[in-house]
Amino acid sequence: MSDAASPRPAGRRLWRVVFKVLHEVASIGFGGGLAACLLINGLADRSSPEAFATARQAFSMIATYLLVPSMAVVVVSGLLAIAATRGYMDAGWAWLKALLGITVFEATFMVVGSSSRHAEMLAAVTRDPAALDALLRSERHTILLLIVLSIVNVVLAVWRPRLTYRVR
């Protein structure tokens, strides 16, 4: 049965579309922010403390003003989409996606937290390159984990596997 022929009220259909569009647009922003942070993490010039400080400031602004707001919109719009779409309420994949989304939201704060460690990283640029490498590697691993979890969420949304169990 097509969406136009379904007996759903027009208001519910409108909200469902609004939440889906918000979810998808915010996901694009989140993915772009992660990609930008990953590039800055790997390509920041460590030979100049000034250039490194500028790169870290850009990282911090992306993390604060793009990653966190877009992730908040992704999580909230996803949960509202579940509430607005009866078919999602019984779908195990939708609830797994919601759980992973909340996990991604929490991990995003780890990236934002690492972006606020400017003083520690700037001191390590000149004093302890090994410590700086360890800090950047840890941050990079967190970003890569977020990218993988985001891809898993997209795969769940496209594949929509039957994830149910029966109580006997």
Image (spheres, grey):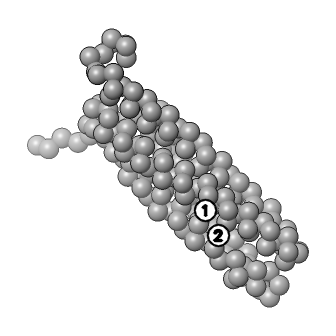
Q: Secondary structure at mark 1?
A: helix
Residue drawn 44% across the image and 49% down it: 75
Q: Name the front one of labels 2 and 1.
A: 1
Q: Nearer the viewer, residue 2 or 155?
A: 2
- Give the quarter of the image for residue 122: bottom right
In the picture of the structure, the residue carrying the numbered disc 2 is 115
Q: Residue 121: where, in percent of width, then height?
A: 72, 79
What's under tag 2, amino acid-wise?
Ser
- In the rendered image, the quadrant that contains the C terminus is top left
Q: Are marks 2 and 1 in contact (CB under 8 Å)?
A: yes
Distance from label 2 to label 1 (Cα)?
A: 9 Å
- Residue extending furthest toward the front: 11
Question: Compared with residue 116, is residue 97 higher up or lower down, i.e. above or below?
Answer: above
User: Mark 2 or 1 closer to N-term?
Assistant: 1
How packed mark 1 is, by other alpha carbons closer than 10 Å (few <14, some 14-19, many 20 or more), is many
Q: Nearer the viewer, residue 95 or 3?
A: 3
120 lies left or right of 96: right
Residue drawn 61% across the image and 46% down it: 29
Residue drawn 70% across the image and 82% down it: 119
Q: Nearer the viewer, residue 121 or 13?
A: 13
- Residue extending furthest toward the bottom: 127
What's under tag 1, amino acid-wise?
Thr
